Image (cartoon, rainbow, N blue to C red):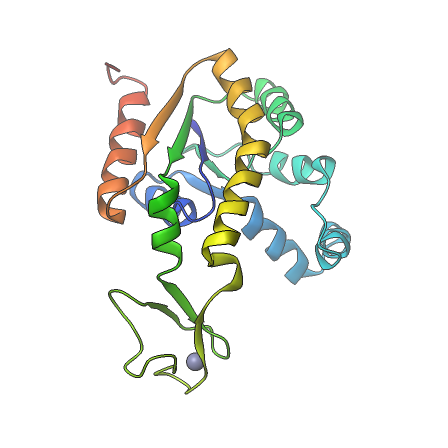
């Protein structure tokens, strides 16, 4: 079983992917995590990737594809998070998977309402010193703006502010729309409305994945 999980920044994709991986045994492949691990290990790819990342550039498709290819064969299946991000990557993934057994089984798109996303992200705050996360609504620091853990200053991240969130959503949509179109032209993309609590979203995702597993009747 191979699943591509897509969704805009702030949809909770990484958290959900980790939970789904725990509950299904599928291997969670996050290109972000993998790149950070390569950089930390000082591998050839890591050194190369670090150059791009330090300049604020995206690591080119070619290297991302080579990295993913080393991990796509896993007996319990794979759950791709953050990949493919471009049509070139989506095509390369299909080609690589054809050489193993089956292509992508399920593409799940977590869609969110932009107003809700703006609300959710602008509630998320972080200590600038020790990086402790807070929710200004449900779990605020006991003194406004001051970290309980280290006394540092707690603020909403610059890129979580409403204007920045709106911009990130637009960038995501521009980049991702072609990838979704690519998958739609090859089969179905399952749309999950990823609003509601993390538990509710997890439930929806689990049901979707279960319905797509071999031996289970979809519909
Ligand atoms: Zn702190």
* Image spot of residue 26 (x, y percent): 39, 38
Residue 79 at least partly seen: yes
Compared with 165, 218 (above or below) is above
Front residue of 78/107: it is 107
Task: Please give left or right for residue 115 compared with residue 52 in the image.
Answer: left
Residue 99 position by quadrant: top right
Give the residue displayed 70% in from the left and 36% down from the top. 61
Marks counted in the figure total 0
Residue 107 position by quadrant: top left
Compared with 69, 39 (above or below) is below
Give the residue displayed 41% in from the left and 44% down from the top. 13
Compared with 30, 142 (above or below) is below
Residue 16 at least partly seen: no
Give the residue displayed 58% in from the left and 32% down from the top. 174
* Image spot of residue 47 (x, y percent): 76, 56
* Image spot of residue 51 (x, y percent): 77, 56
Front residue of 73/122: it is 122
Residue 216 position by quadrant: top left
Q: Determine the quadrant in which ligand 1 lies.
A: bottom left
Q: Residue furthest front?
A: 163
The C terminus lies in which quarter of the figure? top left
The N terminus lies in which quarter of the figure? top left
Front residue of 219/159: it is 159
* Image spot of residue 202 (x, y percent): 27, 41
Give the residue displayed 33% in from the left and 80% down from the top. 144
Front residue of 27/138: it is 138
Compared with 136, 92 (above or below) is above
């Amino acid at each position: 079983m191979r699943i591509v999980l897509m969704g805009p920044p702030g949809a909770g994709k990484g958290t959900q992917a980790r939970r789904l991986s725990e509950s299904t045994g599928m291997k969670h492949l996050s290109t972000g995590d993998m790149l950070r691990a390569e950089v930390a290990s000082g591998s050839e790819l890591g050194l190369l990737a670090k150059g791009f990342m330090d300049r604020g550039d995206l690591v080119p498709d070619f290297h991302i594809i080579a990295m993913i290819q080393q991990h796509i064969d896993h007996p319990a299946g794979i759950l791709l998070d953050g990949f493919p991000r471009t049509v070139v990557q989506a095509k390369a993934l299909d080609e690589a998977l054809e050489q193993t057994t089956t292509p992508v089984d399920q593409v799940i798109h977590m869609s969110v309402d932009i107003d809700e996303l703006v609300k959710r992200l602008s509630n998320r705050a972080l200590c600038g010193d020790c990086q402790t996360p807070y929710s200004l609504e449900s779990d605020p620091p006991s003194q406004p703006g001051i970290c309980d853990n280290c006394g540092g200053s707690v603020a909403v991240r610059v890129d979580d502010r409403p204007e920045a969130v709106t911009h990130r959503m637009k960038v995501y949509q521009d980049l991702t729309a072609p990838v979704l179109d690519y998958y739609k032209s090859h089969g179905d993309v399952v749309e999950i409305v990823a609003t509601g609590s993390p538990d509710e979203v997890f439930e929806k995702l689990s049901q979707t994945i279960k319905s797509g597993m071999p031996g289970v009747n979809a519909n």
